Image: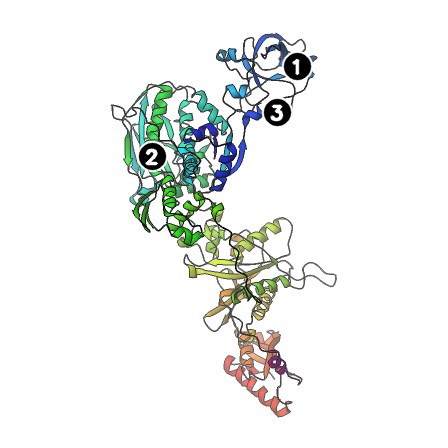
Amino acid sequence: MKFTLSWLKDHLDTDASIDELSQTLSAIGLEVEAIEDPGEQLAPFVIARITETRKHPNADRLRVCQVDTGGGKGMIEVVCGAPNATTGLVGVFAPVGAYVPGLDVTLDKRPVRGIQSNGMMASERELKLSDEHDGIIDLGPDYKDRIGENFAEVMGLSDPVFEVGLTPNRPDCTGVRGIARDLAAARLGKLKPEPELGKVEGDKPCPISIKLDFPEDKADACPLFAGRLVKGFSNGPSPDWMQVRLRAIGLRPINALVDITNYISMDRGRPLHVYDADKLHGKTIRARLGRTGETFIGLDGKSHDVDEDMTVIADDKAVLGLGGVMGGEDTGCTEATRNVFIESAYFDPIRTAISGRRKGLVTDARYRFERGVDPDFVLPGLDLATELVIQFTGGKPSKRKVAGKPPKFDRVIEFAPAKVARLTGLKLKDAESIKILKALGFKVAGKGQALKVRVPGWRPDVHGPADLVEEVVRIAGLDRVKETPLPQLGGVTGAVLTPRQKLVRRARQVLASRGLLEAITWSFIPRAQAELFGGGAAALELANPISVEMSSMRPSLLPGLLSAAKRNRNRGESDIALFELGQAYNGDQPEDQFTIAAGLRQGTAKAAGAGRHWQGAAGEVDLFDVKADVMDLLAASGVNAARAQVSRDAPGWYHPGRSGVIRLGPKIVLAHFGELHPAVLSAMDVEGPAVAFEVFIDALPLPKKKKTLAKSAMAVSDLLPVRRDFAFLLDGDVAANDVLRAAQSADKALISHVSLFDLFEGGKLADAGKKSLAIEVTLQPRDKTLTDDDIEAISQKIVAKVAKATGGEIRG
């Protein structure tokens, strides 16, 4: 937000210096990003008159000019190539040694085609006043008596320009008056009253009708639309003072009508639009939703299509503009305009933001509407614009035409002044808190600690008592909050991390130790990607997304990791191992947020290392690589892998035959792992194959207290383990995990480990629909050495358990 000092003083009666204003603005939350004093930069430039011109003897397009710069310095010879450099022209002269900002050069004496030029006559672009450079500045005969005077001072260009960075929650400060109101509340001046307007209401009704043509459930798209016709005026340049202010903040003056709307937008934060009434088709202007296939030519000269979610303004023939974002070129006002229809409306902030974002249009109107303009200033804004149009161009106004009514904004907050001290530690008198709120435009009623505070329409960001406390404290001054050191605790401080936080930290360390690189991706993803991973519900759609690529809360971390892998592969990196620890979302309630540790491997990025090796061809990653990642993480988290169940019912984004789910019992899902489904990879334009895992940190059991050193030392047996192999003949659809679990359950105290080491499915076994699985069982005696009879007994139990659980038999 930019404004000049004189502009601010139109609303604020103050004698404060530039430094005081700057420090106060930053202190109350309106951070000053820059202060530019154009008077300093333009100090060397003076008003001068060309007294004589002649053709350059060595160049057809150059002229040698005698220039009177005043001050008794005599005539200065200047070589000029501007087509309008004629005798009698009053313009702007830059002497030798002057820095020309538009050219980024410092002038020195140098010959131009054999004739020395002792300075230059400047154009508007060379002084950074505008983009005009077809000729040098022509001030006209009115300034012939100001020869030799400083150009910036004469033209009012020495007015300091403030640039303030606004946070998105302060729509009231998108206008100069809102900033002046805050400064007045901060005791840096007095807010001037609103100026009284002349007679802006005409005697005749407006011949142009206004209609709000929305379905009942979409009526909030534009609840209020007002307008007025002004006829029979002469549209020319706006007054010099207005042009100077618009140029100072970076806007190009166009004509009186357009300049008025731009000025009120910056002055009051109230966007307006003007239509050339003679270019309208029919006698009705409608605010409605767009229709697929409709287009309009915007004021940017480009064609824009609209859709059913966008608010448009249309006449009886076509779309005139995109409501709250940009008007159309076909009904734009020019110097030939004689009858104008002035529009002042209220557009829904969220719909305006979505429309502008879809079209990639960033305009001053959208900037204000999407933050929330004051609904109570729609009609006063129309009257103010009418006043300026009549004042600058003449013409006769009609009566005001209004459709709809302002959106209801009647927010009353129960407030106890004591909350200021309770929430911030700043002790203020109740009277001071009330005075600040009133100065900011809040209406305060009641007594003591039972106040009722009515929020003004220009502060849609204030919702509760804490917001009022924030307003009081920022104006009173955060520097008044006393520094209070934390109490010094005696002895050794206790642990600061919760068991769940320690679990997250341990998971991060384990995954990093397995060669995966940590990534941090966005929590927002495209809805199409969210749907691929079980998300995309309406409750998880953002109301005002930063872009269409960030419209949904992620149901999984894998979309972000896949996008990161794609970017790396596009840059030639084929061996990829990434992991992320973060939040995912099943719904919009607090309990629907959960923590995931997710990982992704591609190429040859195995835990042992990636890339080719001289000993043999490097193998591609597979589901067992990510299963090992999961098992290591579970083991480090205190989960007994032997108790976990592995099943094949992985979610749809995994390959149905190359994936699994790890559970504790039938309900507690600890992890998913496996190869990602080719259709999912194709939809995300990721080159496959890729393997991944998801470990649900919130589902992991918290680790139990560690055993004492003495107990853990006694738990280690001094007897050698015994290993026995078993081969079972099984049906082809029996899962190996069922065999392992059955064997483990034969004697949990004695059997310390069971592993699969062989699978045979060929020959006659395949014809019979059978397969052979061989397992190794480790027996760890605790109290005594096992005899042959003991080993035979436990072997029989293992065979019996496997036979009962799977129907398999020992292979002879």
Dot label at residue 103: 3
Q: Is residue 649 left or right of residue 260?
A: right
Q: Which residue is mark 1?
A: 117
Label 2: how many Cα within 10 Å (few below 14, some 14–19, many 20+): many
Label 3: how many Cα within 10 Å (few below 14, some 14–19, many 20+): few
Residue 795, given in percent of the width and then of the height, sits at: 59, 86
Q: Is residue 15 left or right of residue 720?
A: left
Residue 771, given in percent of the width and then of the height, sits at: 57, 76
Q: Are marks 2 and 3 in contact (CB under 8 Å)?
A: no
Location of residue 303 with respect to 611 vertically, above or below: above
Considering only order in the chain, which callout, 2 or 1, is on the residue closer to the N terminus?
A: 1
At mark 3, the secondary structure is loop
* Location of residue 455 (image quadrant): top left
Q: Amino acid at mark 3?
A: Leu
Residue 725 within the magenta-colored segment of the rendering = yes
Q: Is residue 172 left or right of residue 69?
A: left
Q: CA distance from mark 2 to mark 3?
A: 43 Å
- Range of magenta residues: 703-727
Residue 756, given in percent of the width and then of the height, sits at: 60, 75
Residue 475, given in percent of the width and then of the height, sits at: 43, 42
Residue 562 within the magenta-colored segment of the rendering = no
Residue shown at the point (62%, 60%) measured from the top left: 516
Q: Which residue is mark 2?
A: 378
Q: Are marks 1 and 3 in contact (CB under 8 Å)?
A: no
Q: CA distance from mark 1 to mark 2?
A: 56 Å
Considering only order in the chain, which callout, 3 or 2, is on the residue closer to the N terminus?
A: 3
Q: Nearer the viewer, residue 291 or 142?
A: 142
Q: CA distance from mark 1 to mark 3?
A: 17 Å
At mark 1, the secondary structure is strand
Considering only order in the chain, which callout, 3 or 1, is on the residue closer to the N terminus?
A: 3
Q: Amino acid at mark 1?
A: Ser
